[in-house]
Amino acid sequence: MNRDEALLHVKPHLTEKRFEHTIRVADTALSLAEKYGVSKEQAELAAIFHDYAKYRPVAELRRWVESSYLPKDLLQYHHELWHGPVGSMLIELEYGIHDQDVKSAIYYHTTGRKDMSPLELVLFVADYIEPGRQFPGLDEVRQMAKLDLVKSAWMISRNTINFLMSKNQPIYPDTFYAYNDLTNKVYGGF
């Protein structure tokens, strides 16, 4: 599926602001993929579909989690986490996208996970650093993304955990697993 076709599929499911974000994430993912030797086609497709399920009604997302192979513990966390896993499933059901690497990048783009693939890292970082975003600490991550994809993903995991803790929010276990794994990769294991 080419870029224009993919964008036509996702546009009706996103707000105008989120669609513009999606285009910026796709462009950022392409740039990171080229820099770090990741498939540009896979990076672009994953980026375009990463928020495909974001605006589905919460009740629909819940039904997909409850009635599918997705882990039921997702339901114990904020529904904002559900759109990645549900979206990775829906792109296969609705568009026949079977590429497991693309689906996995979409699945984990919010939480991260232990042993992220290069494609997963590209989407995880691209979604965070795309040029339309602005919040404290972002410029530092953007600069690191130019030098070290793994370290920039580590910084994102650290920042995400710190932010959620400051809001007294529960943190999905995959986010801790990602942080611990990336810490070991950046600073050496025990």
Image: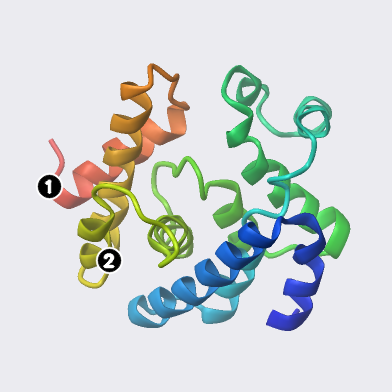
The quadrant of the image that shows the C terminus is top left
* Front residue of 15 and 62: 15
Q: Vertically, is 74 above or below 48?
A: above
- The answer to whether one can see residue 2 in this image is no
Amino acid at dot 2: Ala
- The answer to whether one can see residue 24 in this image is yes
In primary-sequence order, the first of circles 2 and 1 is: 2
Q: What is the number of the mark on residue 187?
A: 1
Q: Vertically, is 52 above or below 177?
A: below
Residue at figure coordinates x 31%, y 23% from the top left: 166
**Left or right: where 154 falls relative to 79:** left
- Residue 38: give x, y in percent of width and height: 44, 75
Amino acid at dot 1: Tyr
Label 1 CA crowd tier, 10 Å (few <14, some 14–19, many 20+): few
* Marks 2/1: CA–CA distance: 17 Å
Q: How many marks?
A: 2
Residue 103 falls in image quadrant: bottom right
Label 2 CA crowd tier, 10 Å (few <14, some 14–19, many 20+): many
Residue ID for mark 2: 145
Q: What is the number of the mark on residue 125?
A: none
Residue at figure coordinates x 27%, y 66% from the top left: 145
- Residue 137: give x, y in percent of width and height: 23, 49
> Do the residues under discs 2 and 1 have CB atoms within 8 angstroms?
no
Residue extending furthest right? 94
- Residue 88: give x, y in percent of width and height: 69, 51
Residue 77 falls in image quadrant: top right
Residue 61 falls in image quadrant: top right
Q: Vertically, is 53 above or below 58?
A: below
